[in-house]
Image (cartoon, helix red, strand yellow):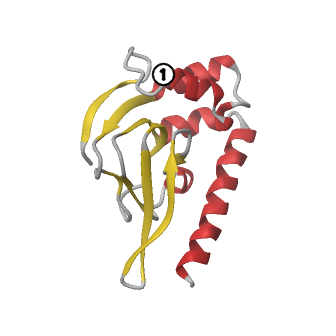
Amino acid sequence: MTVIDSGNADSGERAGGVDEIISNHHLFRSLDDAARAEVRAIGAAETFVADAVLIREGDAGDSFFIITSGKVEVTTAAKGHPIILGILKTGAFVGEVGSLSGKPRTATVRALTPVSVVRFERAKLMAVLARFPKATELLSAVALARAQDTISKISR
């Protein structure tokens, strides 16, 4: 992972509008103001150079990322070669499968452009979201939809 800058999301290093992303992101809409403040406090702003790997398939699923600027490519290894699962940009999140399950990463996420993210440690984020079932349900629904999409793409 090539991080070129890192800082607490609440420290003034708000690359890509961290406050705006957390305040307006559909994942956090069901949270009250106090919980959104908790989410801001546990988030770390990070910036990656183009071609850097944010998440590597098989690694520990210990963090969750919301993209605040830039584009990433999501791939998985199947049939001896990488399969592109998607291109994600500002507002998208990655790492939800590992964050929900605690299991190893199911895909690799690579920066296509310089990318800014807010990174959340799994345990801290899940502790906040556990008090808000709607947010956890949304995260689970996205993880399930992405898993179904992955199965579809690798079985072609």
Q: Residue at x 49, y 25 (%)?
A: 18
* Residue 133 % position (x, y): 73, 40
Q: Residue at x 71, y 35 (%)?
A: 132
Which quadrant of the structure image shows residue 148?
A: bottom right
* Residue 33 % position (x, y): 67, 18
Instruction: Indicate the secondary structure of the residue bearing disc 1.
Output: helix
Instruction: Please tell me which residue lies in front, 108 or 121.
Output: 108
Per the image, the residue denoted by label 1 is 41
The answer to whether any part of residue 7 appears in the image is yes
Instruction: Please tell me which residue lies in front, 63 or 155.
Output: 155
View extreme (top): residue: 12
Q: Would you place residue 133 above or below residue 146 in this image? A: above
The answer to whether any part of residue 104 appears in the image is no
Q: How many marks?
A: 1
Q: Is residue 35 left or right of residue 123?
A: right
- Position of the C terminus, as image quadrant, is bottom right
Amino acid type of the residue tagged 1 in the rendering: Ala
Q: Would you place residue 2 above or below residue 16 in this image? A: below
Q: Is residue 119 left or right of residue 3?
A: right
* Label 1: how many Cα within 10 Å (few below 14, some 14–19, many 20+): some
Instruction: Please tell me which residue lies in front, 103 or 140.
Output: 140
* Residue 34 % position (x, y): 64, 17
Which quadrant of the structure image shows residue 135?
A: top right
